[in-house]
Image (spheres, grey):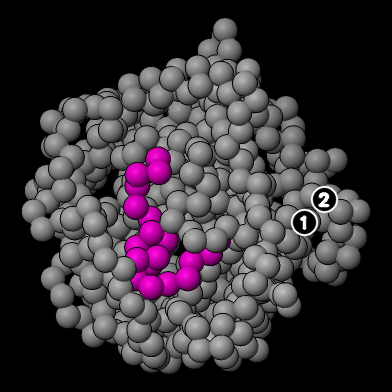
Amino acid sequence: MGRLSGSRAALPGARDVRHSMGTISHVVRIVLVSASTPERGAVVPENVPSSHAPPSGAPSATVTPAPATNEQPNILLIMADQLVPFLTGPYGDAVVRTPNLDRLAAHGVTFDAAYTPYPLCSPARAAFMTGDHASSFGCYDNAALFPADRPTFAHYLDVAGYRTALTGKMHFVGPDQRHGFAERLNPDIFPAGFDWLPEVDENGQFPRGGHAHDYVPPGVGVRTWTRFLTYDEETTHHAVDFIRERALAGIRDTQEPWLLVASLHHPHDPFHVTEQMWQEYADVEVGIPEPEPDLPINALDRWLNEAHDTTGVDLADPDALRTLRRAYYALVSYVDRKIGAMLDAVEETGQASDTVIMVTADHGDMLGERRMVQKRCFYEWSVRVPLLITRPGEQNPGRRCAEPVTLVDLAPTILDLAQVPQGQRTPMHGASLVPLLDGEPWDREAIYSEYHVEKVHASGYMVRSGTLKYVYVHGHDRQLFDLAGDPGERHDLAGDPERAADLERMHALLLDQFDPIALDTATRESVRRRAVIRDAMATTGTRWDFAGAPPPATRYVR
């Protein structure tokens, strides 16, 4: 395929909508008042020559912090890990028990076509924090550096007068373990270094993996307790504590608006649940995937199945699949209870009328669909995420939005809600969702997802435009699905002559955003560089993990 020149200027096919900032009352009613944000062009990795200068009118190096105003809402953003939207109440599952997600959906807006920009934990979160495609700053895998020089929505809100805090898992890799958050309330659950570098062995195979064994018994089932449950208990405790402390600050007339990101580990594997959690679904019929042997498959799928060792277990065993789904349901309900604790804290402290609440996930999980496990691919079970947004005084509660969106859209959305001026922002690939929240139309042509290096031998990309979904594995395969009539992605239209124009249009949209040749080269070079640093850090005992800090003495009686 052809490659791009490397220019960062907006390209003719990009048409990536930028929406204006809103002025927000205490009930967060938005009135559009300002000009649109500059567009971003094709992603070329930072070590590939490119025109990367900001456009004219970009912010200067120094920004004077703005005083907080009573028109800026608090923002509570809750992220789960590997939460499949199709197995939650708001997205139509009749078995699962998610009363807290249900109440959010009833009072806010549910996005029916929300996607991860990268179906892997660390890059998805980096993209979510910055509003940019992860590959644009070299975040390719779960051991890739999240550079400290990339502004995140937390940085912007610090300057806008917010008190910002993070509790839970964010998978930051590198010495910066805050990325703009004024407070980090607990350590991450996973390593902050290059420990999980995606190297191949002497045979060109990825030695780490075998995840499929965690998707069947005895890898799935009842345990007395796990450290992952402990982590989510701790994360929730810190979230509730922060919300209550912010209410106390308001009583002392020292209140500023706050942003809290609370990120839970579950329902990510391992699918280990307590007996009490297991019994929650003792009397229900748990659905399982139907056998479908002739589904479309691409090179990415084959590499992932090999690395996950899906042939080493029986993913067609109905009893094993029911055990897996039952444990997953139990963990989804567990996550829902943790979400409920945070929602209750907001309401009980009288802050509900001033707080925007967002709930999402970093990516999904195949959970045995297509006899696949984990994420990393572009089928709907892997790449779709839940997205619920509730604003105080919502004018149309319970509304659903069918427009395709991604996690990169949340950063500009948060900046709009927090009234961060356009002139103080750097360009982003994402677009604010505020117009969609207000029920207004927009005309963005496509959204994107990408995947590189970890357990695969070439880069993969996804483009969603309208009801069409295009998947490209660089140098290998193309797939084209029309989700309107084929939501299960059973009929690949890439070989249909009548769809040739659609195929080429979708590929052109892809090339407007990414340079596959440059990115394939950059990912391999990145792994080699990081291997040297990983080995040096192991030799010297250097660690980047955030250790946490005790509460300040001024919090208690002194």
Q: Give the image quarter of residue 234.
A: bottom right
Quadrant holding the N terminus: top left
Q: Give the image quarter of residue 477.
A: top left
Marks 2 and 1 sit apart, C-alpha to C-alpha, by 5 Å
Q: Which residues make up the magenta segment?
A: 147-166
Residue name at image x 10 percent, y 58 percent: 57
Residue name at image x 71 percent, y 68 percent: 237
Q: How many marks?
A: 2
Residue name at image x 62 percent, y 60 percent: 185
Q: Which residue is mark 1?
A: 229
Left or right: 300 in relation to 337: left
Nearest the eye: 236 or 257: 257
Residue 82 against residue 294 in the figure, above or below: below
Left or right: 481 in relation to 496: right
Q: Which residue is mark 2?
A: 226
Q: Could you tell me residue 14's position as x and y percent? A: 17, 50
Q: Could you tell me residue 381's position as x and y percent? A: 53, 52
Q: Residues within 10 Å of mark 1 (few under 14, many from 20)?
A: some
Nearest the eye: 558 or 512: 558
Left or right: 368 in relation to 20: right
What amino acid type should be assigned to the residue bearing mark 2?
A: Thr
Quadrant holding the C terminus: bottom right
Left or right: 122 in relation to 234: left
* SS for callout 1: helix
Q: Could you tell me residue 226's position as x and y percent? A: 82, 50
Residue 162 located within the stretch drawn in magenta: yes
Nearest the eye: 406 or 522: 522
What amino acid type should be assigned to the residue bearing mark 1?
A: Leu
CB of mark 2 within 8 Å of CB of mark 1? yes
